[in-house]
Structures are given as structure tokens and as C-alpha cells.
Image (spheres, rainbow, N blue to C red):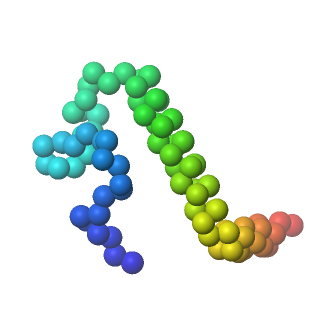
Amino acid sequence: MTSNPKAGDGSAEEPRGPSGGRAGPSASPQETEAERRKRRAVFLRELTEARELRERVQPRRTKERRMREAMRMRTFRI
């Protein structure tokens, strides 16, 4: 699988730097630790929501994935 350099991650709210890439820590020195934690919490909440939606939309695949993972875990137990 090849990566697509033009593909985004779907988030339009992230600040962009002058080169079009994401702004790093040097572009936003006034960001506090609390703001970073708040942004991270929102991201993790959305990620969890997306996973739950995927499980509801594709229940058979999810069940198969769980079964494969359980089998994989069993093979490493002594």
C-alpha cells in the first residue's frame, strides 16, 4: 500500500503552517498545557466515537476481528 501525500486526516480545525503542513509547537508557543490536553481529549473522544460507529456499521467484520485477536492471544499463552 502506498501513502498518498495529498490525503488529509479529515480534520479541518487544525492550524496550518506557512508551508501548508500542520503547525508544530514552534508555531504556537502561547498554547498552554491545559489547551493541549483539551484538544487531545476531544481527539480521543472523536476517535472512540468513530470506532464505535465502525463496529455498529460492520458488526460481522468486528466479530471476526475479535475472534482472530482472541485466537492470536491464545496461541501465546502457556
Q: What residue is at 25 percent from the left and 65 percent from the top?
A: 5
Question: In this view, which residue lies farthest toward the right?
Answer: 78
Q: Quadrant of residue 16?
A: top left
Residue 59 pos. (x, y %)? 67, 69
Answer with left or right where residue 51 lies relative to residue 19. right
Q: Quadrant of residue 35?
A: top left
The C terminus: image quadrant: bottom right
Q: In front here: 26 or 42?
A: 42
Residue 68 pos. (x, y %)? 72, 74
Residue 65 pos. (x, y %)? 68, 71
Q: Is residue 22 above or below residue 31?
A: below
Q: Is residue 34 above or below residue 41?
A: above
Answer with left or right where residue 20 lies relative to residue 41. left
Total count of labels:
0
Q: What residue is at 52 percent from the left and 43 percent from the top?
A: 44
Question: In this view, which residue lies farthest toward the bottom?
Answer: 1
Residue 37 appears in the picture as rendered:
yes
Q: Quadrant of residue 63?
A: bottom right
Answer with left or right where residue 39 lies relative to residue 6. right
Residue 1 pos. (x, y %)? 39, 78
Question: In this view, which residue lies farthest toward the left?
Answer: 18
Q: Is residue 28 above or below residue 58?
A: above
Answer with left or right where residue 42 lies relative to residue 7. right
Q: What residue is at 30 percent from the left and 42 percent from the top?
A: 14
Q: In front here: 72 or 63?
A: 63
Residue 65 appears in the picture as rendered:
no
Q: What residue is at 32 percent from the left and 70 percent from the top?
A: 3
